[in-house]
Amino acid sequence: MGNPVGGKNLLLSGTPIFFETEKSRADLEKQLLSGKLMIRELSVEGRLQDARTIRFYLKNQLRRNISGTLELTVPLKGSRPKHFSVPFAELRPGIIETVVLRLDNDIAPTSPPIEGIAKTATSSGKFSVPVELIVCPYIAERPKIDGDISEWMKHPALTLETIDFLSPPDAVSHGMWTGNADLSIKAWLGWDSEYFYFAARVSDDIHVRKEGNVFAGDCLQIAFDTRNDALARGYGRDDFEFGFALGKENKPLYSRTWPLPPAVPETILFSARRGNGVTDYEIAIPFKLLKPLGPVEGKVFGFNFVALDADLSASTDYWMGYTYGICGGKDPSVFKKFILGR
């Protein structure tokens, strides 16, 4: 998807020039030297806002306004896929603008992305919308936040116990991580009309406890992209990150680490227990602290969690997380997508 670039001066608005070819390097060089330089006319990012809403983020790469349509076929729950033609008009250069598609039925939470085509008067190009959703189940009987996670065992768990979830990549070769007993996680999520719940069992044979600072020893971090609208690295105003630890004398330590400045919201319920090589965490965060994410069935949000291990030094040696994006650089755009369900 592109337009010929005319004139001697070229002003790019952020998206790199790209080339696709199966030619050899020598043939590609000839092609580039004899061809015309093109730039991508329009970039499209799609995100689910809830079970019946897709929000598209459009960026015009040209130096003039453009109009067109987004053509896509959406798989719907309990019915046949339906085709949609979503118009957009007079997109201004270099500015991200949004277009919303509202559906009459819930989207089918399938793993393959929805494939679409963006069409303008002069070109067309493909885009995709990720729709792989993990259900965050409704909890009918409110759990007691006491560090006893036995009541969570009846719910589906997310298990992290292989090097696929481990960072940095050389933690194994340097002998820092030696297996599941060294560091692994089994986690549960849930929600009700007042709280978002997170429980985890972190296997860690050497548990480092320190006073005061959550991140001075072993700890757990969770983070939210509340609108599921992150398109790049860095947290936004409506993203949240929290840290939790079990300090000396079994003192629970926690803090909201984003947005800044750090704070300790007194309305969070948190308890943790340590024994037999595992640390159990149980957390309840009021939805009032997670606005605009609210207790509404069908709401989609980005979420991530990570356990940090400080076996060998006074700082974190390595960590295990569901995805990248908390430790090693904040990037909520790569968080897994969850939906508040029953």
Image: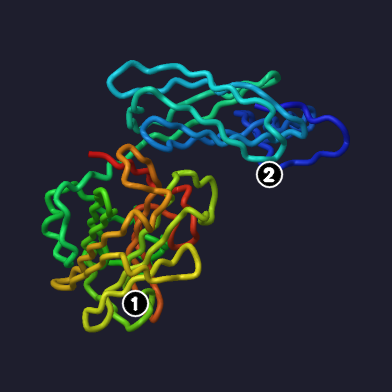
Q: Nearer the viewer, residue 304 or 180?
A: 304
Residue 14 numbered mark, or none: 2
What is the distance, in whole Å, between disc 1 and disc 2 at their CAs?
40 Å
Label 2 sits on a secondary structure element that is loop
Residue 92 seen in the current view: yes
Above or below residue 73? Residue 330 is: below
Residue hosting label 1: 217
Residue 312 drawn at (x, y percent): 34, 78
Q: Earlier in the sequence, mark 1 or mark 2?
A: 2
Residue 176 seen in the current view: no
Find residue 160 and report its image quarter: bottom left
- Point out the image quarter for the C terminus: top left
Residue 31 drawn at (x, y percent): 73, 29
User: Residue shown at 19%/48% (left/top)?
Assistant: 139
Residue 60 drawn at (x, y percent): 68, 34
Q: Amino acid at mark 2?
A: Gly
Crowding at mark 2 (Cα within 10 Å: few <14, some 14-19, many 20+): few
